[in-house]
Amino acid sequence: MASGKSAFRVTALCIGIAVMYLPILVLIGYSFNASPLASVWGGFSTVWYGELLRHRSLLDSALLSLEVAVTASTAAVVLGTLAAIALVRFARFPGRFLLTGMVTAPLVMPEVITGITQLLLFVSLLETFSWPHRGFITIVLAHVTFCIAYVTVTVRSRLQGADRSLEEAAMDLGAGPTRAFIEITLPLIAPAILASWLLSFTLSLDDLVISSFVAGPATNTLPMLIYSKVRLGISPVINALASIIIAIVGTCVIGAGWLMRRAEERRVLEMRAAERANAEPEPDAPERAPVAVRSPS
Amino acid sequence: MIRIPPFTDIFTRTADHHLHLTLSFASYRRLFNDDLFGLAYLFSLRLALCSTLICLVLGYPIAYAIARARRSTQNILLLIIILPFWTSFLLRVYALEAIIANGGLLNTVLLKLGVISHPLVIMYTDLAMYIGIVYSYLPFMVLPLFATLEKLDPALLEAAADLGSPPWRVFLDVTLPLSVPGIIAGSMLVFIPAVGEFVIPSLLGAPGNLMIGRVLWDEFFSNHDWPTASVVAIAFLVLLVGPIAIYQHMSGRQVEG
């Protein structure tokens, strides 16, 4: 009976994973199809990858999307981390409820609505202040807005799990709040910051709907260009492009996952070593003494 | 000054430098007079709800299997589930097209095998939208379900079995009630984005389908009717996001209190 149950589980799992990966594998397969028709296998060929290089507009859009994604995710990580710190470390301040609501709103807001509202905001700003002109800057601003939500949620949960006493210990030993934050808190939440940067980066790189609303007529991000090509059916050049993107993203995610796991393991080992050292009588640390001694208030 | 059709200024300056406010509720009237929007809301809600249920039925066994797997396998399985989430959503929806299109893989294989004599028409139908949503949002259902099922104490299941419950009773009486938080979280994660989905209906659905996200997009980009699009968006917010925000606020209160 037990084996029957586990067989059911394994089958469910295999079918689920197969369903998730089949379309992607088929797409990669078709990218090597010499025939432009999906229904005909014209033999193995890399012609579409060569064709890709001749599409200047694709390369331009890809560069633009990368620029937008790097700028937006970096800005979102800074702002989102600050918001998370405010929400976790300060229990009560005016506007806390509003901040929580505003920061997490994009998570439940349908993309079309985020897009429309942002566009209307940018249009009225432009009429009032003659800024910002639709294009790179408006796309970045819109992406920052929705990425902040993901950063805040990720960093907040890590910060809630972080041991506050470490930071307090640093301050007791004479570190100022800034120094305690940079040397203790920041390394503790670094994995969450890295993860949320990667998440923001991919979300920004992938965004079609919000970009379409806020981009001006002359600006085309990569998803917008891909969308305009695939809405009319299957395009072999896009198959090749998609395969390249999937390969890059797959490598990066697996690599990042591996690095983070190693960092986590090392941290656990260090913690254990520290606990062992704590059990023994503590050796003096004379170099710590001269650090500005603060009188406890 | 950029003029975008058709909207009139809400504020205009009169000759004696007074601000003059002009409000029009014509677009709100249109929302109630035109069947299109009401139908679109209902259609989107139905499609999202059904897709969420399908995701739940498909995702539960997967989450359960991962939760019961060994630790080392668990991490790899989770990575496998999360990986597609990192690759482009647009490209995954497009990849689906290569399978379900009239000349796609599914029809080619079925025709070759002689199972069918005419290609199945899946592309550009409601069925294609269901497939698209379930396929794209399944990981969002699996992950929260896994999180609650993993915390489930196996001793409870053993106790129920020891007391004579057959496996299906154990599942119904113990596992299922204890995984309700995961079911709710997963359903929210699938349902909310599915209602307002644009990419899937526009790539896989019939050209004039009634998904609200697509209707809104058309109102904006094809009809250039910004006031009506804004009204539809506000109605959408009030009808969908409002209740969800209130629900989350209430459940957050419960946890804190």
Image (spheres, coloured by chain):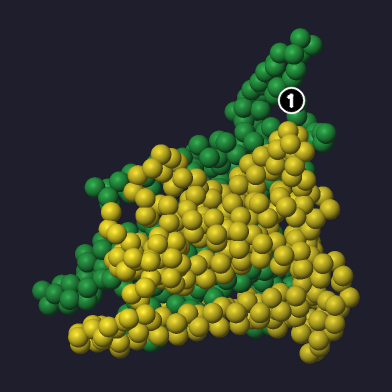
Chain colours: A yellow, B green
Residue A99 coordinates in the image, percent (x, y): 46, 45
Q: Chain of mark 1?
A: B
- Please tell me in which quadrant of the rendered image residue B95 appears: bottom right
Which secondary structure lies at badge 1? loop
In the foreground, B6 or A76: A76
Q: Amino acid at mark 1?
A: Asp
Q: Residue furthest front?
A: A290
Q: Say left or right for B3 vs A282.
A: right
In the foreground, A293 or A74: A293
Q: Is residue B53 visible?
A: no
Residue A105 coordinates in the image, percent (x, y): 50, 48
Name the residue rendered at 50%, 83% in the picture: A259
Q: Is residue B160 visible?
A: yes
Q: Say left or right for B78 vs A282.
A: right
In the foreground, B219 or A95: A95
- Tell me the crowding category of disc 1: few under 14, some 14 to 19, or many 20 or more residues within 10 angstroms, Cα based: few
Residue under label 1:
B9
Residue A150 coordinates in the image, percent (x, y): 51, 59
- Please tell me in which quadrant of the rendered image residue A188 appears: bottom left
Name the residue rendered at 75%, 42% in the picture: A131
